[in-house]
Amino acid sequence: MTEEKRISPIGTAAIMCLFLVSMGFTVVTPAIAVLGEHFAGKNVAWVSTLPTLFTVLGTALAGSVMGKKMKYRTLAILSGFLYVIGGCAPALFDNYAGMLVCRAILGFGLGLMAPLGNALIVGNYKGQKQASLLGYGTLFMNGGGIILQMLGGALADVNWQLVFWGHAFGLIGLFMAFFLPEPDAPAPAPEAAKSGKKEKMGKTVWVIAILFVLFNVLNYPVMLNISGLFVARQAGTAATAATALSMYTVAGCVAGLVFGTVFKFAKRWCVALGYILCGLGALCVYVGQNAVIMTLGLILIGFGFSTIMPAFFAWVGVVTPASTVAGAISICMAFTNLGAFISTFWLQFLDLVFGESVLSGIMIEIVVFLIIGVIFLIYSPFREKKA
């Protein structure tokens, strides 16, 4: 694509709606305790974790078909349909096994949807406009997460089955999917055109994917155990921790809003800045003995991660040929969800080695994130040319 396409405002809005509804699995998070009471003796944690595994499968499939065997718009409509059906169906019956099947369908639909937004931005926009929209995508993702969690909490106070109707929020994405702009098929590089061979995905994509996995694995101890830390340190109650977590999401919204500007003036330093902020944030959580310091830590982590994420997707656009960008983004999204799944085993490993998984996990997170931040201070990912 030599010139940037002119995309209508409704087309851009449709892309942002994919981000808005992408945190659909979080609707049930505030209702886990209520579900635990109703399904006594069942491991209701699967209600939250099972969709993650199927999201990985859906994302992997999306990468192999979108823009090739199936149009982006068609795939978005299919994913939105699975999202709404799998998400809302448990409201119609009272069966634990059936609910897990529906959660798997929801996860698969979310997986098909996960790479679409970023792939459409990278495929349809260039330069500063692309960077700004990648940031706005993070803003809409975090904003949608706040809306969905609040909606789930409000519905859980009424009835556990009503919680699942919260997934009807996905109808916004399903409706707007009909207006998604389809990217032009990228022209192959001259060398590939002459040889008749397919262009290969840049090897650096796998480095980016591994960094996504590593982030989710290491950050999980903070997000999972923050409520217990607040209580153990007498820094507040579970409600205080929930407020602090909401500030994490708000910080992510702010980072998404300003990412385009930050990328314009500090493109060279974006990834380093994100990791250093996350490392310092984890340090605040580790040493903080009151709600203010610990909340500050979560704000720094939220801002840092929502700077790293769009910067990584911009990096993908640099290191791999245009014809392979969609598949590359799918791999990165699949690895992101894989990291959330692996994190459970990481916590078990920490328990085995250190006898606990909270403070040891946070300390490792601090060290690794600061080291990666220093590495990216030295190495600029945006110097690379396309493979």
Image (spheres, rainbow, N blue to C red):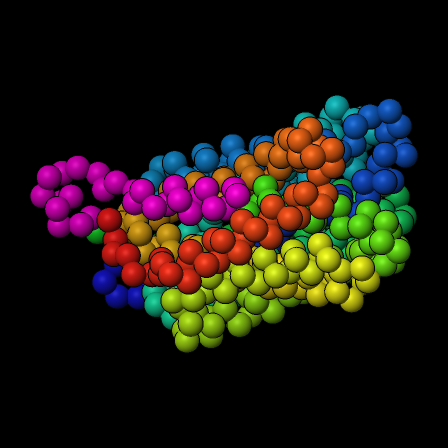
Residue 205 lies, in percent from the top left, at: 37, 45
Q: Where is residue 106, by image quadrant? A: top right
Depth check, front residue: 262 or 273:
273
In magenta segment, residue 380: no
What's the residue at 46%, 49% (across, down)? 116
- The reply to whether residue 105 is visible in this rendering is no
Position of 190 with respect to 266 (left or right) is left
User: From what the image shows, is residue 91 above or below residue 290?
Assistant: above
Query: Main SS type for the magenta part?
Result: helix
Q: What stretch is highlighted in magenta?
A: 188-214
Q: In this view, does 329 lie to the left or right of 158?
A: left
The percent coordinates of residue 158 (x first, y second) are 90, 48
* Picture residue at 72% right of the left edge, 43% below the top: 358
- Judging depth in this view, the residue of 125 and 350 nearest the camera is 350
Position of the N terminus by quadrant: bottom left
- Can residue 343 be seen in this snapshot? yes
Residue at 35% in and 37% down? 69
Give the image quarter of residue 301.
bottom right
> Could you tell whether 325 is left or right of 32 in the image?
left
